[in-house]
Image (tube, rainbow, N blue to C red):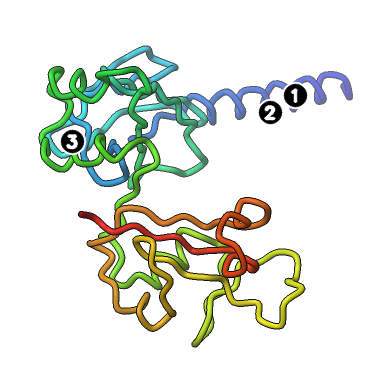
Amino acid sequence: MKTFTSTIILLLLIFSHLNCFSQEIVIKGKLTTYKAIPVVNANVIIQSSKKTVKTDETGAFTCVCQMKDKITFSAIGFIKKTYKIKKNESENIIIDLKLSSKTGSGEKAIKAVHILELDKFREFVNQGPNYKDYSKYSTLMEALNNEFPLLKITSNKIIIRGPSSIQLSSSAGIEVDGVLVDLGMLKSLNPNTIASIEVVKGSEAARYGARGTNGMIVIKTKK
């Protein structure tokens, strides 16, 4: 009798596990590139069913998956990406595809009609693979706080977290388009005008001489 009861319990547990895994859920999300531009007409492949759906003109997609399922996203000119469904997940999934490093990948993506915002996309491509769009931030300070966790920004200086400096000041140097500026000048810059931000520290900052003793925040604006 004890063995029979144990078997029943085991079967119930197995059935419960299989039922949980096979439960269908609706997944909604959006596919982008450079965290800003929709990738349209891209393949959204569900691993369990092998079914494929397409992203619409806004990059949005809706698909039916199993719990703990996997979804693969692919589009011509981009690096394929696989995403694992998390527990109780159903919507607001944002997947960002990276452009392939192969020459002409951007134009291949355009030719395949994966990109509708052509001018903005070509601007990103021309800036190179490390280009970031800072226009989503209201201020440059907000951009620095969100994009660079190594930075500690106070009312009058920026400190690059790390080993203490041997100098009396721990303030990092700030350079904009090759010109040394203060924090006040930095705060006045519009994020829309920023092409790149680089945090330089350690031995790499030696090329800036004494002003790079505590590291450098190097910013280039759009020309």
Quadrant for residue 54, please give it. Answer: top left
| Within-10-Å neighbours for mark 2: few <14, some 14–19, many 20+ | few
Asked if the residue at tag 2 contacts the one at tag 1, i.e. Cβ–Cβ closer than 8 Å, the answer is yes
Q: Position of residue 123 (x, y in %)?
A: 20, 41
Quadrant for residue 125, please give it. Answer: top left
Q: Is residue 162 above or below residue 50?
A: below
The amino acid type of the residue labelled 3 equals Arg
Q: Which residue is mark 3?
A: 122
Q: Position of residue 33 (x, y in %)?
A: 29, 37
Q: Is residue 207 left or right of residue 92?
A: right
Q: Residue 110's mark? A: none
Residue at x 29% of width, y 72% of height: 189
Q: Residue 10's mark? A: 1
Mark 1 and mark 3: Cα distance apart in space: 59 Å
Q: Earlier in the sequence, mark 1 or mark 3?
A: 1
| Within-10-Å neighbours for mark 1: few <14, some 14–19, many 20+ | few
Q: Which residue is mark 2?
A: 13
Q: Is residue 69 left or right of residue 53?
A: right
Q: Is the C terminus in the top left, top right, bottom left or bottom right quadrant?
A: bottom left
Q: Is residue 208 above or below residue 60?
A: below
Q: Is the N terminus in the top left, top right, bottom left or bottom right quadrant?
A: top right
Q: Nearer the viewer, residue 33 or 167?
A: 167
Q: Nearer the viewer, residue 122 or 30?
A: 122
Residue at x 59% of width, y 65% of height: 212
Q: Indicate the secondary structure of the residue bearing disc 3.
A: helix
Residue at x 36% of width, y 53% of height: 196
